[in-house]
Image (cartoon, helix red, strand yellow):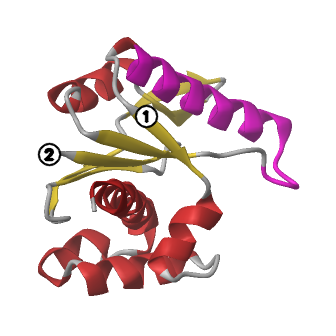
Amino acid sequence: MIFLGIDPGVGGAIAVLDDLGGIVEMIDMPVIEVRIGKTARPRVSPAGLRSALLPYAECTICAVEKVGGITGQSASAAFTFGHACGLLEGALAALLMPVAPVTPQAWKRSAGLAADKGAAREAAMRLWPGRAQLFARKKDDGRAEAALIARHGWLQVRRVAA
C-alpha cells in the first residue's frame, strides 16, 4: 500500500509513505518559471505534476490539504494559489487517484501540532529521524506538511482497517 500527502502550492510538496508509514519519496512541488512583465515567477508545472503523480496513480489514498483563501492575501496571490490548487485537482482527477481532502486542523490535530510551520518541521524530524535531512531547512515546511498530511491519511486507513 502507498499513501500520498500533498501540500498544494508552489512551496508545497508531495510525500509518499509505505504501508508502515515510512517515507518512500519526497517530491518538491514541480515548478516552472513564468515571465510576468520583466520578472520570472515560479508556478506549478502541469506536466511536472502529472509526471510526479503518475507512478503513484494506484496509491491507496492521496490525502490533500483542503485549502481556502488567506485573510489579507492579495487578489493576484490568491488567484495564483487557486490556479495551482486547480491544476493539482485536475491532475488527480485525470489519473483517477483516490483523493481524501483533509483540513489543516484535522492533520495538525492528528500530529499534535498548533499552527506554527516550524512545529511541522520539528514533528516530521521527530517522526522520521532517519530522514530528518528532508526537513532541515526553514523552506522545507512544505515537505514536512506533506509528510504529516500523508501520515494523517495513513492513520485514517489504519483505523478503518482495525
In the depicted structure, whether residue 101 falls above or below residue 110: above
Residue type, label 1: Val
Identified at 64% across, 37% down, the residue is: 81
From the top left corner, tell me how far across and down residue 90 is, in percent: 48, 18
Q: Disc 1 marks which residue?
A: 99
Residue 118 lies within the magenta run: no
In the depicted structure, whether residue 156 falls above or below residue 98: below
Residue type, label 2: Met
In the depicted structure, whether residue 137 falls above or below residue 4: below
Q: 54 or 112: which is nearer to us?
A: 112
What is the C-alpha distance between the residues marked 2 and 1? 15 Å
From the top left corner, tell me how far across and down residue 61 is, in percent: 32, 41
Q: Which residues are magenta?
A: 70-93
> Does the residue at mark 2 contact the one at mark 1 (Cβ under 8 Å)?
no
Q: Disc 2 marks which residue?
A: 1
Identified at 57% across, 32% down, the residue is: 85
In the depicted structure, whether residue 108 falls above or below residue 100: below
- Label 2 sits on a secondary structure element that is loop
Is 65 positioned to the left or the right of 47 in the image? Answer: right
From the top left corner, tell me how far across and down residue 130 is, in percent: 11, 80
Tell me the quarter of the image containing the C terminus.
Answer: bottom left
